[in-house]
Each structure stands twice: as structure tokens, then as C-alpha cells.
Image (cartoon, rainbow, N blue to C red):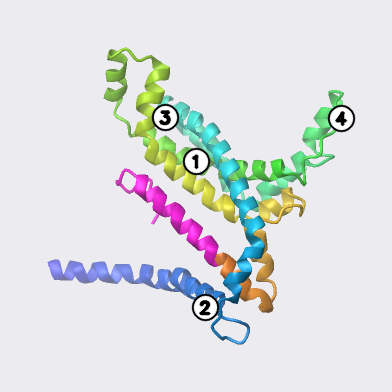
Amino acid sequence: MKQKRSLLEKAAAVPHMVWVALFILGPLVFVLYFAFTDTRGKFTFTNIELLSSYSHIFLLSICFALVATAICLLLGYPLAFVMARAKPSRQKLLMIMLMLPMWISLLIRTYSLMTLLDNGGLVNSLLVKMGFSPVTMIGTGGAVILGMVYDFLPYMVLPIYTSITKLDRKYMEAAADLGCNSIQTLFRVTLPLTVPGIVSGITMVFVPSISTFYISQKLGGGNFDLIGDTIERQFKYPSTYHVGAAISLVMMILILISIAVMNRFSDGDGEEMIV
């Protein structure tokens, strides 16, 4: 019986293994191949050496991603705390409100922001009606960061919400018995115990933020060239596949480092980890 179950388990794992081989390991192999070869297929380090000319793009992408991640954390933690402490029926309503925009395509959400922030959009129309001058928002770094925050905020809220809901209320009761008020309990008890959720949320926001390209193209008005934009442009022409692969390789390393950091601070129960 045990041997039969083992065979069934192996058979059930075959589709997953095929999927991983075709759509995860396969693309990684192609990236490595193109990153270390030239247009004639010869081994070379030239593509890696050319990365120094894209250092300003890497720096700008990291800065934008860090700012967006910090804003998501400042907005997401209070929201997750309120959701976790609300009544069960209200938690469901808040969760639906949080996830509802995620049911819409990222393209449509980005175009919606463009409609709101455009020179003749809703925001500027309201400013003009109130007697203020219109403000140029599309084509600015603030618009790009706003798009990142809008699209990736749920990725920050959900892991933190999960960590807070898992907390044993006895810790808060013990802190209150020892004389801590609600603010002291938040910073001395709740916040330290939810570090795994915070780190998971930071990683889940930082990784897509640093690799995004559509948001920066539409909300940035083409004024900001981020890593995702550069990779997309390089893969438009076969002659530049190799440089694009080298940039993608760096991106893969950054993502792996982020995941390693997140797993390092995870509480080990598998709910906040990404493998």
C-alpha cells in the first residue's frame, strides 16, 4: 500500500516537474546562453562588460522600487492592522475592497490612472473648478511611483494581515498587564512579531516594482528608462538579445537575493515564503 501511494505521489508530481522544466528552467538556460555568447554563438564576457553603461538605469530602478516599497509599507501596515482587528464580517468586506482592483487587468488599471492624472483628467478638472492651476503629473517620477503603489499595495497588505491574524492575543494581554498602552504594545509586541510578514510584503512589492516596464512607459511618458523597459527594448531586435539576456541575468540575481532575504526572516511555517 505504501509503495502504491509512493508511485501515485510520483505520478502526481510529473506535470509539475514538466511545467518547471519547460517554463522555469528552460527560459533560465536560454538567458544564461544568450548572456555569455555573441551573435555567432561564441562564448564571450562582452555582454557582461557592457552592463556598466546601464548602471544609471539600475540605480534609478532600484530607487523607484525602494520608494514605492516604503510607501506601500507605510500605507499597508496600518491597513492590515485595521483589517486584522475588525469584525469577521467587516474583514471580508475590506478584503473584497482590497482585492477588487486586482481582478482587473494591470493594463486597464494603468490606463485608468492615466485618465485620472492626465492634464485634462479628473484630478486636474477638479483642481481647475476649485480655482487652482492644473498640475502636470503624467511624465513625472511621482506618477510612476504612484502606479507602482496602486498596483502592488495588496502584495504588502496580505502577508502582514496574515501575520497579525496569527498572533496570539495573550501577548497583547500580557503587555497590557505589564503597563503598556496600545501604542507601546504595537511597537514593542505586535510589530516585532510580524516581522516575517513585513519582510515578505517588502519582497513581494520590491520584486515586481524593480522589474516593471508598462507602468513606467505609460505613466512616465517615456521620460524614465527602467530595467524592465531596457530589457523589453533589447529583446525587440535579435542583434541585441545578448545584452538583454545579460541585463535579465542581473535582474534574476537581484530577485534571488530578495527571496533569500525573505526566507531568512520568515517564521518557517511556509505561509509567507516564496520558493
> What is the span of residues highlighted in magenta in the rendered image?
249-275
Residue type pointed to by label 3? Ala
Lateral position of residue 45 relative to residue 9, left or right: right
Give the percent coordinates (x, y) of residue 249: 53, 66
Q: Secondary structure at mark 4?
A: loop
Q: Secondary structure at mark 1?
A: helix
Q: Is residue 165 visible?
A: no
Q: Horizontal placement of 66 versus 238: left or right? A: left
Magenta region, main secondary structure: helix
Instruction: Give the amino acid type for the residue marked by disc 1 in the picture.
Output: Met
**Mark 4 lies on residue:** 133
Residue occupied by mark 1: 156
Q: For marks 1 and 4, give the CA distance.
A: 35 Å
Nearest to N terminus: mark 3 or mark 2: 2
In the image, residue 56 above or below residue 102: below
- Badge nearest the viewer, 3 or 4: 4
The residue that mark 3 highlights is 84
Residue 138 versus residue 123 in the image, above or below: below
- Compute the Cα span from label 3 to label 4: 41 Å
Q: How many residues crowd mark 1 within 10 Å: few (<14), some (14–19), many (20+)?
A: many
> Looking at the image, which is closer to me, 142 or 23?
142
Q: Given this view, does label 3 or label 2 mark the residue nearer the observer?
A: 2
Q: CA distance from mark 1 to mark 3?
A: 14 Å
Q: Which residue is mark 2?
A: 33
- Tell me the residue at 30%/47% (across/down): 268
The location of residue 211, given as percent across then percent down, is 58, 56
Amino acid residing under circle 2: Tyr
Q: Quadrant of residue 161?
A: top left
Task: Give how far apart the Cα atoms at labels 2 and 4 are.
Answer: 53 Å
Q: Point out the tag, 3 or 4, that comes first from the N-terminus.
A: 3
